[in-house]
C-alpha cells in the first residue's frame, strides 16, 4: 500500500513522465484495474472500510479520529480462520486501544496518532482547525532533504517487511502468510531525497489544468478554504516544486515495490505469491485548484489497483470497483475456491478474483461515502459505467460522464438530456442512504470524542500508540542457544554438507 497515490501520476496508468518500472512490471504480468476507487477519500476511513469490507457509515469509521471498533471482524480475522498468519508492517491509522484488529503480528508502530485528537466539528464546520488541517506550508516547503520523518518511517517499514519475508522463508511454520507493507509516501509533505528528485528534470514537470474559481463546485471551494489555498495561496513555482517532490516520492515507493518483489524472488516465493498493490486514496495535486484528498473527484478518490501472481491473467479491467471488493477478493484467493469462513455481517463488495483470472465481470459500479472534515453533511458517490454521481444535502448534485469528460469539467446534473438519469441517481441516493440519520450519528460521535479527548488531555497520558514487541533475549546469538546451530538455522538458503537446501 502507498498513501495518497493517485493512479494518474504513475507510468503504469499512462503518465508520460512519472517512472514506476516495478509497478509497471507487476501490471505487465497481471491485471490492472482502471476504475478502482477508495470507498472514502481519507486515510483512516479508507483503510477501515477496506479491512472490514463494509461502508464507513455501517462501522462508524467517519473520519481520521473515529475509533475502529474491536467488535468489527476484519479481513485478518477471516484469513486466520482459513489458516493464514497475518503480518502488518507500516501505517494503518488504527484509532483506539485495539492496534491489531486481527493481525497476528505488527512489526512497526504507526506514523499517526491513535487517539481522538483529529476529530472534526460539524457544529462549527466553517472554522479551520489549524493544528492538524493541511495547509499551504507543504507547497512552500516542497523540495529535497537528506531525510524526513516520513523517510525515516518508510525505511523502517520497508526493511521490516523485507526482513519478515526472509524470516518466513527460514521459519518451520509452513502456514501461508498475508503480509501488508504499508508506506506513507507519496503523501505530503512533498519532500524527497536528492536521489529521487534528480530522476526528473524540474522544467519537465507538468502543471495542473487551469480552472476558473467561479466554475468550482461548493465542496471544492470548502476544501480550498480549509487548506488556505484561497487565502495564503501558492505560486506556479511552488506548484511545480510540490509536483516534482510528489513524482520523486512515487518513484521512491516504486523502488520499495521492487525490493519486496526481489525478496520474494530470492526466497523462492514469487511464483507462489499473489501481490496486490493499491493506495488508500489519491491526491488532487492542484487539479481544480485543490490539493490532497477529501473529495470524490477522480484524482482524490481513484486508486491504483494491480494484482499479479499465480493464475492472474495479463489484462486491463475497465469495470468500476473499490476497496470494499478487496476482502472478498482475498478470501477467494485464500480459500482457492472453497467455502469462506462464516461472515459475521454482510459485506458490500464483490470478489475481483474472477476478473483478475480472466473471467468477465458483470458488475460495473461502486459507491462511496465521505463523513469527515470540510463538510457539515454526509457526501455520497455512485460510480456506474461511464457516469459518476455525487450528492450532498447542502450542495447542488454533480453528474459526470467520465468517458468523454475525465477532468469532470461539465456537470450534467441540470442538463436536459440527462435529466432522467440525474433524477434516477437522486432517487437511488435517497433510497440507499438516510442522510439525516447518518448526520445525527456523526454529530453524536464527534461530541463524545471531543469530551473523551479533553479528559485524556487533563490527566496523565495513557497512549494507545502501538509499541512493537522486541524479543532481544532470543535474537541473533544468545548464551542459551547453540552457536553452531544458530548460524545454519538463520542462513537462507540452509547450508548443509551436501550444499544449499
Image: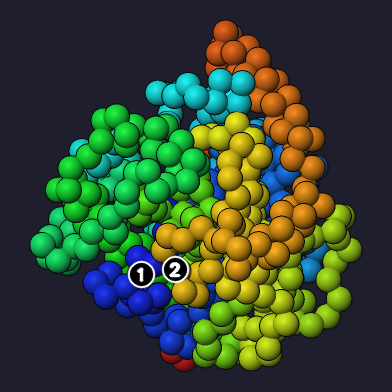
409 is higher (above) or lower (below) than 441: below
Cα separation, mark 2 vs mark 1, equals 16 Å
Q: Quadrant of residue 248?
A: bottom left
Residue at 32% from the left image edge and 49% from the top image edge = 212
Residue at 63% from the left image edge and 12% from the top image edge = 455
Q: Residues within 10 Å of mark 2 (few under 14, many from 20)?
A: few
Residue at 40% from the left image edge and 75% from the top image edge = 13
| Tag 2 near tag 1, CB within 8 Å | no
- x, y percent for residue 200: 16, 65
Closest to the observer, 175 or 132: 132
47 is higher (above) or lower (below) than 179: above
Could you say whether the residue bearing mark 1 is in a helix, strand or loop? loop
User: For mark 2, what is the residue?
Assistant: 406
Q: Earlier in the sequence, mark 2 or mark 1?
A: 1
- x, y percent for residue 413: 59, 57
Nearest-to-viewer mark from 2 and 1: 2
Closest to the observer, 47 or 437: 437
Q: Is residue 144 left or right of residue 296?
A: left
Closest to the observer, 372 or 160: 372
307 is higher (above) or lower (below) than 55: below
Q: Quadrant of residue 194?
A: bottom left
Could you say whether the residue bearing mark 2 is in a helix, strand or loop? loop
Residue 323's disc is: none
Closest to the observer, 237 or 212: 212
Q: Is residue 139 left or right of residue 470?
A: left
User: For mark 1, what is the residue?
Assistant: 10
Amino acid at each position: 500500500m502507498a498513501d495518497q497515490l493517485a493512479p494518474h501520476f504513475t507510468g503504469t496508468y499512462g503518465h508520460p513522465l512519472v517512472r514506476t518500472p516495478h509497478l509497471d512490471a507487476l501490471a505487465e504480468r497481471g491485471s490492472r484495474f482502471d476504475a478502482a476507487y477508495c470507498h472514502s477519500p481519507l486515510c483512516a476511513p479508507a483503510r477501515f472500510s477496506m479491512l472490514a469490507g463494509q461502508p464507513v457509515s455501517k462501522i462508524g469509521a467517519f473520519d481520521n479520529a473515529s475509533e475502529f471498533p474491536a467488535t468489527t471482524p476484519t479481513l485478518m480475522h477471516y484469513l486466520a480462520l482459513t489458516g493464514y498468519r497475518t503480518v502488518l508492517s507500516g501505517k494503518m491509522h488504527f484509532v483506539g486501544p485495539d492496534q491489531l484488529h486481527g493481525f497476528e503480528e505488527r512489526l512497526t508502530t504507526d506514523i499517526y496518532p491513535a487517539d481522538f485528537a483529529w476529530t472534526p466539528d460539524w457544529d462549527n464546520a466553517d472554522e479551520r482547525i489549524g493544528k492538524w488541517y493541511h495547509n499551504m506550508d507543504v507547497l512552500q516547503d516542497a523540495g529535497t532533504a537528506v531525510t524526513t520523518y516520513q523517510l525515516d518511517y518508510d525505511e523502517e517499514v520497508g526493511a521490516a517487511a523485507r526482513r519478515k519475508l526472509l524470516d518466513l522463508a527460514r521459519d518451520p511454520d509452513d502456514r501461508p502468510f498475508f503480509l501488508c507493507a504499508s508506506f506513507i509516501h507519496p503523501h505530503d509533505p512533498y519532500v524527497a531525497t536528492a536521489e529521487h528528485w534528480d530522476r526528473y528534470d524540474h522544467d519537465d514537470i507538468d502543471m495542473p489544468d487551469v480552472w476558473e474559481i467561479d466554475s468550482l463546485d461548493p465542496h471544492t471551494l470548502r476544501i480550498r478554504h480549509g487548506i488556505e489555498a484561497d487565502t495564503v495561496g501558492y505560486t506556479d513555482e511552488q506548484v511545480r516544486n510540490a509536483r516534482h517532490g510528489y513524482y520523486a516520492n512515487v518513484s521512491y515507493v516504486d523502488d520499495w515495490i521492487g525490493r519486496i518483489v526481489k525478496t520474494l524472488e530470492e526466497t523462492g516465493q514469487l511464483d507462489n505469491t499473489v501481490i496486490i498493490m493499491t493506495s488508500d486514496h489519491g491526491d488532487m495535486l492542484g487539479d481544480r485548484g485543490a490539493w490532497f484528498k477529501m473529495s470524490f473527484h477522480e484524482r482524490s478518490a481513484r486508486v491504483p489497483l494491480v494484482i499479479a501472481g499465480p493464475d492472474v491473467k495479463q489484462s486491463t479491467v475497465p469495470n468500476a470497483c473499490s476497496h470494499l471488493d478487496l476482502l472478498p477478493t482475498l478470501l477467494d484467493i485464500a480459500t482457492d475456491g472453497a467455502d469462506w469462513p462464516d461472515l459475521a455481517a454482510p459485506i458490500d463488495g464483490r470478489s475481483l478474483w474472477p476478473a483478475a483470472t480472466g473471467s468477465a465481470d458483470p458488475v460495473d459500479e461502486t459507491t462511496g461515502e465521505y463523513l469527515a472534515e470540510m463538510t457539515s453533511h454526509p457526501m455520497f458517490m455512485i460510480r456506474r459505467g461511464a457516469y459518476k454521481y455525487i450528492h450532498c444535502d447542502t450542495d447542488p448534485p454533480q453528474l459526470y460522464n467520465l468517458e468523454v469528460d475525465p477532468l469532470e469539467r461539465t456537470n450534467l446534473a441540470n442538463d436536459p438530456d440527462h435529466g432522467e438519469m440525474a433524477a434516477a441517481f437522486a432517487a437511488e441516493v435517497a433510497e440507499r442512504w438516510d442522510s439525516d440519520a447518518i448526520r445525527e450519528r456523526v454529530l453524536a460521535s464527534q461530541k463524545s470524542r471531543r469530551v473523551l479527548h479533553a479528559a485524556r488531555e487533563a490527566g496523565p497520558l495513557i497512549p494507545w500508540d502501538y509499541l512493537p514487541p522486541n524479543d532481544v533475549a532470543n535474537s541473533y546469538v544468545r548464551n542459551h542457544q547453540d552457536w553452531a546451530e544458530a548460524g545454519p538455522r538463520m542462513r537462507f538458503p540452509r547450508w548443509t554438507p551436501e550444499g544449499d537446501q
